[in-house]
Amino acid sequence: MKILTYEVEGRQKIGIWNHDENWIYPLDSFGMEYSHMQEVIENISESEIQLLNHMAYKDPYGIMGAAPAKEARILAPILKPQQDIICLGINYMAHAEESARFKKEAFGGERPYAVYFSKRVNRCSGHLEGIPAHEDMVDSLDYEAELAVIIGRDAYGVPEAEARKYIFGYSVVNDVSARNVQTRHQQWYFGKSLDGFFPMGPCIVTAEEIDYPPCLGIRSYVNGELRQDSNTGLLIFGIDHVISELSMGMTLKAGTIISMGTPAGVGMGFNPPRFLKPGDQVICEIDHIGKIVNPVV
């Protein structure tokens, strides 16, 4: 199912898209009184998931509170993450090459260990929300389309073969980055954590809906021009490895968001670089999940 956080007539709700995504059915119409997505992730039962998957194919006119999708404001599915986002750096080989080229570093093609960093996100941005340009401190604003993995239950000491059992679902994110801030501070946390730098959505697709491991087309567009065009099957370090490695030493709490890294085609990868500016529109999309559209403001 595709589960989302949305607003209609001034009320914030949790719902599911129907099968053709023209309607949204609120969870409370099925007796599920979840007020926000974290509660859903922590408490939803397998039988409730099965019911929602079944109801997604029902006629909307028999469902109380069903709303036309075009009348709803689509918010980020997880509005306020409980912890920092865990991110993978340079996790596609072609992006590793363009990153090294931008930094004028030699690249030998070896990636023995995953690169992890965190991203402070006080509030995730939703579909059609603006990406702040922060022009007072940023002169090299960049986009990064990424697959997000949402952990469904607390995970500690998870073997790779068991990792998929801990996944609630998947979403699309844009790991917006200020390259000059990254370079100045010689680390990524500050340059990736400015307000408005984590658009997410438009929904979470629950894990049972997508073949594992996900091998999905991933793309980004700037002002309609295709910039990134790859597949999540090309991850250097896959989901099994990442969940297992991280959980060997720390507990991944239910609701944890892991952003799996971006493919080649970001602004810094062009010669000369092609960074974002106010008025630009960025689209990030992943097959079978959806797309998020965000203007730069």
Image (cartoon, rainbow, N blue to C red):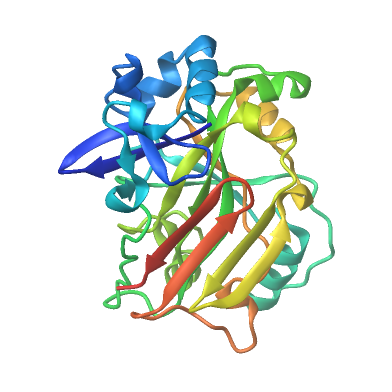
Q: Which residue is drawn at 79% across and 68% down?
A: 107
Give x and y (percent) for residue 90: 67, 57
Q: Which residue is drawn at 64% across and 26% down?
A: 208
For residue 266, side relative to residue 239 (left or right) = left
Label tally = 0
Q: Which residue is drawn at 44% across and 15% down?
A: 44
For residue 171, side relative to residue 288 (left or right) = left
The residue at the far bottom in this view is 272
Give x and y (percent) for residue 54: 53, 22
The residue at the far left in this view is 10
Residue 290 in sight here:
yes
Using the image as rendered, state which of residue 174 and residue 169 is in the foreground. Answer: 169
Q: Residue at x 47, y 24 (%)?
A: 55
Give x and y (percent) for residue 125: 34, 52
Q: Is residue 233 above or below residue 294?
A: above
Give x and y (percent) for residue 120: 38, 47
Q: Is residue 237 above or below residue 180?
A: above
Q: In this view, does 39 lie above or below 238?
A: above
Using the image as rendered, state which of residue 242 and residue 282 is in the foreground. Answer: 282
Q: In which quarter of the image is the C terminus?
A: bottom left
Using the image as rendered, state which of residue 110 and residue 88 is in the foreground. Answer: 88
Using the image as rendered, state which of residue 161 and residue 104 is in the foreground. Answer: 161
Residue 124 in sight here:
no
For residue 43, side relative to residue 234 (left or right) = left
